[in-house]
Image (cartoon, coloured by chain):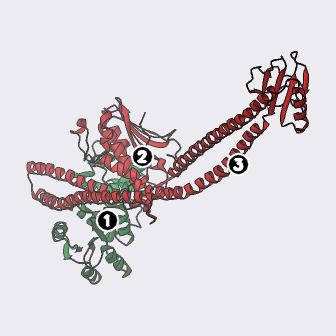
Amino acid sequence: MPRALIIEDDEVTAREIVAELVVHGMVAEWVADGRHGLDRALEGKFDLITLDRMLPGMDGIDVVAALRRAQVDTPVLMISALSDVDERVRGLRAGGDDYLTKPFAPDEMSARAEVLLRRRQVGESGVNRLRVADLELDLVTHAANRAGQELPLQPTEYRLLEFLMRHAGQVLTRTMIFEHVWGFHFDPGTNVIDVHIGRLRRKIDQPGQSSLIRTIRGSGYVIAPAD
Amino acid sequence: MRPLTEVWSAATSRLMLIYGGLFAIWCVVLLGAVQFESSRYLSGVIDTMLQQRITLLSRSEPSGLKGAIENAVTIDPAGVMWLGLFDDHGRRIAGNVSALPAELPVDGLVHVVESGALHPVVGRPVRSRAVVMTLPDGRRLVAAKDSRTIDGLGAIMRRGLLWGLTLTLIPGLLGGFLLSRAPARRIRQMQLAAEPIQRGDLSRRLPVSGRGDEIDLLAGIVNTMLAEIERLMGEVKGVCDNIAHDLRTPLTHLRARLYRTQQQLKGPEEAASLDACLADIDALMARFRALLRISELEDGQRSACFQPIDLADVMRQVHEFYGPLAEDRGQRFELDLQPMPATRGDPQLLFEALANLVGNAIKFTPAGGMVTLRSANDDDGGYIEVGDSGPGIPEGEREAVLLRFYRGDGSRSTPGSGLGLSIVSAIARLHGYGLEVGGDGHGARIRMRFGPAASAVG
């Protein structure tokens, strides 16, 4: 079972993170201040760390920077009340792997945590072909085909499909999709992303084929073989 | 806008010119009066002399008159006073006056003779004052005096005037110019100090020189007002931020609980109603995020991550991002790019601003309508314009739509936080861009201008 360390000084938030991660099958440990958190992160073998940006004892940025200096490469999800892009950039530069702004929806948090966990397990390089059921995507030629039939994709559709397929079986929220596929960090409203997903769906699901991209109510999307 | 210092120096030079002109006019009037009075006085003296002389001569023995005149002429070789005796046909009997001046009335009063063959010594006609008197025996007696002395006085006065004006006006104007330069320099400093304040950085103050003069006094007053405005703005912002911060924590918790309940429920009906609850809470949280986002943007510290950007590229990305949505709604979405100046900015924020504008345009335009995203140039410079064929924004609401939470009456039923345009407005302000809201009955047009907003959108 993956082990997660939660470094968070607000007890209510911490309990929510713990509860949500436990629901997703993780073992979670909570530490309330930065210095203690750093110690635990250095000695414990964790698969994931969620780290508040503003902490008593030691700032979140300093914690992650110290971790990286000590060659600890555990994925770190930074969680902060500071939503500014500058803060995000600072957090990621210091060594954070993802950045989530408070207030956050728990499913958003767990979706990001899952992606970080999986990335650690699988690694990102070395693959040049992704496959979900009978859908194939060639990462070199950008060609997609389903059941042997070529699918013409626009560049954006390709990036969207690649992101979904790289994280096949994982829930991806609209915000995550917007951040990764388009590279922007703000709230674009829900329906624009839905429309893009809708188009992609119409392209990859021909009549008579099972739908591969599923909508997760209230959260986002997941691409997976139909049950 | 012209720089304030330019206006200021224009004002001081105008003032100096007016003052110099008035001074010159006053000098001319003064010296004119002096000249007038003194020549009147001198003329009076000459006239009395001439009158006395001619009266004296006329009363002397008629037979000795010729001799007396000849004597008088002899002892006056310089020709100070000219005398002449003529017979009733105008022929000269005695004296140094060559002929009777034709224009001179024979009435025993002194008159000015502009010219006339009068002067015996100079040998040509000169301006003079003269009197003619008819004696009882019909002969005519003339006495005259050169009036160039008086005219010479006028010339001296005019020269004096010229010197006086030159010697006072030149140092005066020069001094005035030099004196006005120091305040102009300080006004320039204030202008420089005020620029960030105009852009919204209320923490800046006007410079105070410490001399305690009028400019310092004014700067002090303005600084006090700025401090008060800053304090009030801080309080308002603090209250807003606190509310948003305080409310979003319980909201987050509430959402988490609902979400967990929803995950545990199996019945589709309960799940559907919980879905609606979650959607409502998400909308609320989006609104809080937007509020805090505006607050962050308004702190105005973002220009640090400005970089050279290609606005056309940002516009293409926005077009690409929203194209499918417009298409799904049966709208035409056109992109029209004109060459735009190279500029510095934050591409993330500019994308967000344009995305908000385009998102709004798509939202308010009915199916079959049209949305345009274009860049263009006019006399006031370049701009990016988002236009649509929706209901448009009523004239009276165009200022208000940029305010926080404002939503037109027609848009109450449409989902949205009412904060989109406030975010756009904050981003534009951060870049020093102007926002112009316009349009007509056939749609709204919002322009983001690379410079201060022009008065109105055509």
Q: CA distance from mark 2 to mark 3?
A: 57 Å
Q: Nearer the viewer, residue B417 or A117?
A: B417
Q: Say above or below: B232 vs B108.
A: below
Residue at image point 52% right, 38% down: B379
Residue A224: x and y in percent read: 27, 56
Q: CA distance from mark 1 to mark 3?
A: 82 Å
Residue at image point 84% right, 37% down: B80
Q: Colour of chain B?
A: red
Element at badge 3?
A: helix
User: Which quadrant does the C terminus of chain A fall into?
Assistant: bottom left
Which residue is disc 2 drawn over?
Answer: B434
Element at badge 1?
A: strand
Which residue is disc 3 drawn over?
Answer: B163
Q: Is residue B116 visible?
A: yes
User: Position of B93 compared to B409: left or right?
Assistant: right
Residue at image point 90% right, 34% down: B71
The kind of residue on which mark 1 rests is: Tyr
Quadrant in the picture for residue A93: bottom left
Chain letter, colour green in render: A
Q: Nearer the viewer, residue B225 or B315?
A: B225
- Subunit bearing disc 1: A
The kind of residue on which mark 3 rests is: Trp
User: Which quadrant does the N terminus of chain A fall into?
Assistant: bottom left
- Subunit bearing disc 2: B
Q: CA distance from mark 1 to mark 2?
A: 32 Å
Which residue is disc 1 drawn over?
Answer: A99
Residues marked 1 and 2 touching at CB (< 8 Å): no
Element at badge 2?
A: strand
The lab-note entry on whether marks 1 and 2 share a chain reads: no
The lab-note entry on whether marks 2 and 3 share a chain reads: yes
Image depth: mark 2 or mark 3 in front: 3
